[in-house]
Image (cartoon, rainbow, N blue to C red):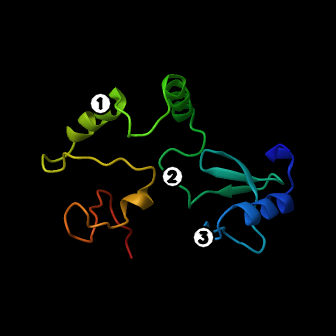
Amino acid sequence: MAADQRGKAATLALRRRLLSNSCRLFFPEDPIKIVRGQGQYMYDEQGAEYIDCINNVAHVGHCHPLVVQAAHEQNQVLNTNSRYLHDNIVDYAQRLSETLPEKLCVFYFLNSGHLSQIPTGAPTGKTTPIQLWPTPVR
């Protein structure tokens, strides 16, 4: 069945059966079934509009036309990870390195800001990661 034709209860039942319970769901007793996003908004299956203040889209929003176009163009060429040698990752690292102090010249690209905050201690023996963005004011 197409996801857009599946009711909220059926989607929730599939999620509970197929996804680990460590993948947390907001409002688990009565979750909102989001069916699409545009800009800073998300929409549920009833058409209700919500401002998205949680997901990783605050910088450009959902479905930003320039991001969609760039992703489309890249996916027509290659969609892979950093384990294969490709020009794009080193070109981006080069451009990024030109904007940072010389000591910050080695990069480890991740798919989310959350992953970048998990301290591993592997490279330095320290347990505090470096953050290059402002922390929230308390």
- x 68%, y 52%: residue: 42
Sequence-wise first label, 1 or 2: 2
Q: For this view, does 101 lie left or right of residue 112?
A: left
Of the pair 61 and 69, the residue shown nearer to us: 69
Q: Which residue in the protein does label 2 denote?
A: 58
Q: Where 28 sits versus 110, above or below?
A: below
Name the residue that disc number 1 marks. 91
Whether label 3 touches label 1, CB < 8 Å:
no
Q: Residue at x 79, y 63 (%)?
A: 12
Q: Which is nearer the N-term, disc 2 or disc 3? A: 3
At 40% from the left and 50% from the top, the residue drawn is 110
Q: Would you name the residue on which mark 3 appears?
A: 22
Mark linked to residue 113: none
Q: Is mark 2 on a helix, strand or loop?
A: loop
Mark 2 neighbour class, 10 Å CA radius: few under 14, some 14 to 19, many 20 or more: few
Q: Position of residue 107 (x, y in %)?
A: 27, 47
Residue at mark 2 to residue at mark 3: CA–CA distance: 25 Å
Q: Which amino acid does label 3 sit on?
A: Ser
Q: How far apart are marks 3 and 1 (CA)?
A: 36 Å
Give the mark toward the camera: 3 or 1.
3
Find the distance from the CA under tag 1 to the CA under tag 2.
Answer: 25 Å
Mark 1 residue crowding within 10 angstroms, few (<14) / some (14–19) / many (20+): few
Amino acid type, mark 1: Asp
- Quarter that holds the C terminus: bottom left
Residue 38 in picture, x, y percent from top left: 65, 44
Quarter of the image with the N terminus in it: top right
